[in-house]
Amino acid sequence: MTEKITPFSKPTGGEIITEEITPSSRPTGGEIITEEMTPSSRPTVNVKVTKFVEAKQSSNYGYSGAVAGKAIDGKTDGNFGKKTCTHTQNSGNPWWYVDLGSPIPISKIVIYNRGDCCGNRLRDAKVRVGNNNVSPFDKGNDQCGATLSTSMIRTNPIEIVCSPPITGQYVSVYLPRREFLTLCEVELYTDRSKNV
Ligand SMILES: [Ca+2]
């Protein structure tokens, strides 16, 4: 079958199309445009955030040592008996958050889950970053990564990527049901420009 070439279906292959610069597409006179390196095009390194103002959680478990600060004490052991994990009461919509003192762009969050038992308690947890510090942290701030699914919490630690990075002073973990919330460590990372 031979296709009849009409003016509308004429193949354009091989044609040299010269784009004319019209007044509307012409660059404005005299300007020299230098492409700036934006944060996204700059080589970056992941830097761990180590300065915190305080951490808080919705309630403290009977054992007084399992306070919110245990999630940022630098110790990642998942054995609750090692006394480096947080633990709330079995309460509705438990939450935990850390105050960074000022807004920081967070690119990655690594959660060390409890390993001696009960790791599935973190299922459905939402991790958020933002400047809102009103409990129970189920809204107001942007969510980093996906809501923790059964498959995501099979690995320990759990790595959550904020893509793109989210800037905020508060990082929170929120569980949308009645449950214990335990975090053995929460590591935060920010992208910094590499000195080249
Ligand atoms: Ca810890």
Image: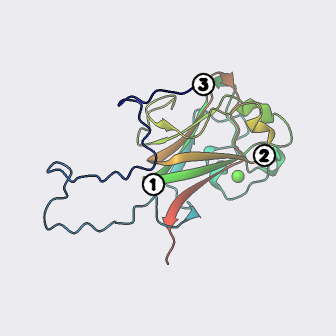
In front: label 3 or label 2: 2
Looking at the image, which residue sits at the far right? Answer: 116
Secondary structure beneath label 3: loop
Residue at 39% across, 61% down: 38
**Rendered image quadrant of residue 151:** top right
The type of residue carrying mark 2 is Asn
Name the spot of residue 141 as percent of width and height, x first: 45, 36
> Where 178 sits versus 57, above or below?
above
> Mark 1 sits on what residue?
104
> Where 194 sits versus 149, above or below?
below
Q: CA distance from mark 3 to mark 2?
A: 23 Å
Residue 111 lies left or right of residue 101; in this view the side is: right
In front: label 3 or label 1: 1
Instruction: First in sequence, mark 3 or 1: give its number.
Output: 3
Mark 1 neighbour class, 10 Å CA radius: few under 14, some 14 to 19, many 20 or more = many
Q: CA distance from mark 2 to mark 1?
A: 25 Å
Residue 68 lies left or right of residue 100; in this view the side is: right
The type of residue carrying mark 3 is Asn
The type of residue carrying mark 1 is Ile
Instruction: Report the number of numbered marks.
Output: 3
> Where 142 sits versus 14, above or below?
above
Image marks 3 and 2: residues in contact by CB distance under 8 Å:
no
Secondary structure beneath label 2: loop
Name the spot of residue 89 as percent of width and height, x first: 68, 29
> Mark 3 sits on what residue?
93
> Mark 2 sits on what residue?
156
Residue at 43% across, 30% down: 5
Q: CA distance from mark 3 to mark 1?
A: 26 Å
Secondary structure beneath label 1: strand
Looking at the image, which residue sits at the far bottom? Answer: 196
